[in-house]
Image (cartoon, rainbow, N blue to C red):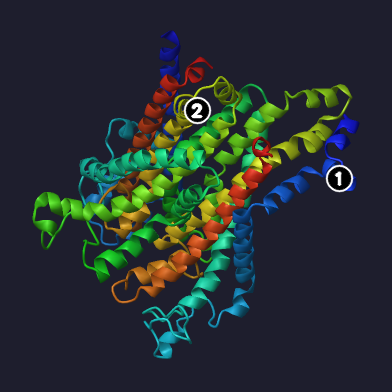
Amino acid sequence: MAGITKYIIRRLLFMIPVFLGVSILTFAIVNSAGDPIALIRQGLRQASPEVLAALRAYYHIDQPLYIRYLYWLWDILHLNLGVSISGTPVIDRMGPWVLTTLELQIPALILAALIGIPLGVYSAIHQYSKRDITVTSFALFGYSMPTFWLGLMMIIIFSLYLGWLPSAGAVGITHLWWGSELGDRLAHLIMPLLVLTYVELATFVRLMRGNMLQTLRDDYVLAARSSGLSERTVVYKHALRNAITPIVTILGLSFGSALSGAPGLETTFSWPGLGYQFVQATFALDIPMIIGITVVITIMLMVANLITDLVYGMVDPRIRLS
Amino acid sequence: MENKDSAVIPNVDQERIEKRREASQGAVAWRRFRRNKAGLAGLFIVLFFAFIALTSPWLAPYPARSFQSLYEGEAGQAPSLKHPFGTSKTGLDVYSEVLHGSLGDLYVGVGATAIAVLIGIAVGSVAGYSRGGLGDVLLMLSQIFYTIPLLPLILLAARVFLILVAQGFGLTLIMILLGIFGWSTIAFIVRGEILKVRELEYIQASRALGASKSRIILRHVIPNILTPVIVTATLLIAGNILTEVVISFLGFGDVNTSTWGLTIQEGYAYIRTEWWTTVFPGLATLFAVLGFNLVGDGLSDAMNPRLRD
């Protein structure tokens, strides 16, 4: 028990330098171009004097750079993310955006894991057979494709030519699809969800197949086989357990990268989640909004990593002892 | 043992066996790679795109970023003999843009990977060799770069720097950004390999024989870390091309240089009437990335001693 408490504390402590690293990088990029207020005015030439004055106060423009950073860090730690150039406090917008992103990401990740892991195992057991080659090629196309482009192709086919599904947004604006509120949400969700599931599934298949192939060559599997256990028991009871543990890490990582990797897909489908809003804010050079979203993404990433580490520590005793 | 070998297989070509025994690691890997059809297909695709990229100024019927079709009254046309991939509403010949784009995207993909490999080897080997302070700091730095949300930071940096600093160097800027942010995996691999290799008996043996530190690093350590680095770098090229295409598609790239993502972005606005402007550059991306992935997977199989027959 003491081992695992120590392990949790170590992982929690690791979050501090990561958060500081991201905050310094973001602050450096924004300030590397000189006065951030001048940068904001590039994006919004007719900003009202009140908004500019508020920004000036928030960033403590009259102070030297490192003092500015400390003030800013202090504000962030108190969840004061400043006011967007449109005049609304940044923090108020985050909740709905995070939920919209999660509404797409979580089902995709669950579906991808549920389909991808068994497919990978199946592929490894039947290595070099026709079925293995079919599965491997299916996966290979998945991780060789720009996610957003696959989305575009689906929009062209299913929205523009067949007219079956809506091409943009999370809810219908002019009319409800499929008759009801729930149907409408589903109709909007289905294409981005399919695209994301396919691309993430490809990663799972690839890794699961690779892990399984390596494990099946391990000595202890040979020992299990030669002790007369059935192939079924060897594969599913002995090999699978060890082959599946690294997948936990991948689950966490792909959740993290999906959060920051979603801008392309979310923009294609005008899905109003964090990624889409980040692109909009960056175009408008809405600096407080950009930083706010980066901070929120980083926190979500770190939480995802922490959960991954903890689960991994529970599954694999070697980790928490080392 | 020698006699027993020839007794069991009397008809083997002794010379071939000798050759096999003397073959270098590289020759062994190549022999195994050659038998991997998927890997060979990937290599062919990669060479094909490299050829197109290098000859695109002569191959392409129109110069890069030329809106000439607009003045010829042929903008927004479906694929035809004159314009095999059609023309965009803005007057780009999509076929020419795809050819020119392969130069831009391979430049970013390969260049960014080269930067990442250099930083990764430097950080990873120092982190692996120095026990204590510096090594820990570098390991922590690698972990930070591994955890941070890369794409948002790259997009932000591209947007800020393109406005104020790097007008005209857009593509190089994207390349440098991708390289600077993408080295952590390489660093981990190099560090791990060095930690593993430096404790091996043969390194201790050569140390005991009085080999100098630089000889050990050059003759024994580098060849051992090179294999996994090459495999990862090949896959990293694929990843960097994909990221570049996303960056350009989102409008954060260089608007003066042809890239596949930029062409897709121009087609996106007119997606209702013209499918060809988004389809063809996307297919080019798919095949180029597929090629690098196949080569990477093939190399990884060929160089993996555990899968050796």
**Residue placed most toward the observer, A127 or B194:** A127
Asked whether the beta carbons under mark 2 and mark 1 sit within 8 Å of each other, the answer is: no
In whole angstroms, how far apart are the C-alphas of marks 2 and 1? Answer: 40 Å
Q: Residues within 10 Å of mark 2 (few under 14, many from 20)?
A: many
Chain under numbered label 1: B
Quadrant in which residue A227 is drawn: top right
- Specify the amino acid type for callout 2: Ala
Vertical position of residue B162 compared to residue A71: above or below: below
Q: Residues within 10 Å of mark 1 (few under 14, many from 20)?
A: few
The residue drawn where x is 23% and y is 42% is A99
The residue drawn where x is 24% and y is 68% is A162
**Residue placed most toward the observer, A196 or B23:** B23
- Specify the amino acid type for callout 1: Asn
Note whether residue A24 is visible. no
Secondary structure beneath label 1: loop
**Residue placed most toward the observer, A11 or A67:** A11
Residue at the spot of label 2: A239
Secondary structure beneath label 2: helix
Left or right: A205, with A191 as reference point: right
Q: Name the disc covering residue B11, or none.
A: 1
Chain under numbered label 2: A
- Return the x and y of residue B47 as percentages of the image width and height: 64, 64
Q: Is label 2 on the same chain as label 1?
A: no
Left or right: A108, with A218 as reference point: left
- Return the x and y of residue B45 as percentages of the image width and height: 59, 63
